[in-house]
Amino acid sequence: PVVATDTEPARWIVGDRNRFLARPGDADDLCRKIQNAFTLGRIDYGPQGTWESSAELFAQALLRA
């Protein structure tokens, strides 16, 4: 399991699994989320892109900027 600060990029990675996202600046919430993650088994995040597809998306974003 992944625990991250609730930011746009982190939400994009974990999808709608808010139980893995801690409120920014809230160390207690982050600690609780990490403690809870220790109780979880393997998490299926669904299909993930390849490095190649991620690089292509990044290249397209750079061209649009």
Image (cartoon, rainbow, N blue to C red):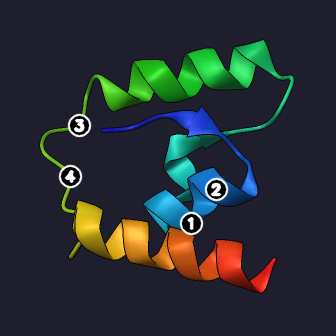
Q: Amino acid at mark 4?
A: Ile
- Between the C-alphas of marks 2 and 4, the distance is 19 Å
Graded by Cα atoms within 10 Å as few (under 14), some (14 to 19) or many (20 or more), the crowding at tag 3 reads: few
Q: Quadrant of residue 4?
A: top right
On the image, numbered disc 2 is attached to which residue?
A: 9
Question: How far apart are the alpha carbons under marks 4 and 1?
Answer: 16 Å
Label 4 sits on residue: 43
Which disc number belongs to residue 49? none
Q: From mark 2 to mark 3, how far is it between C-alphas?
A: 23 Å
Task: Answer whether labels 1 and 3 touch (C-beta < 8 Å).
Answer: no
Marks 2 and 3, the one that precedes in the sequence = 2
| Label 1: few (<14), some (14–19) or many (≥20) C-alpha neighbours in 10 Å | few
Q: Are marks 3 and 4 in contact (CB under 8 Å)?
A: yes
Counting residues from the N terminus, which is met first, the one under dot 2 or under dot 4?
2
Identified at 54% across, 69% down, the residue is: 58
Discs 3/4, front: 4
Left or right placement of residue 51 versus residue 36 in this view: left
Q: Which label is found at residue 40?
A: 3
Q: Nearer the viewer, mark 2 or mark 4?
A: 2
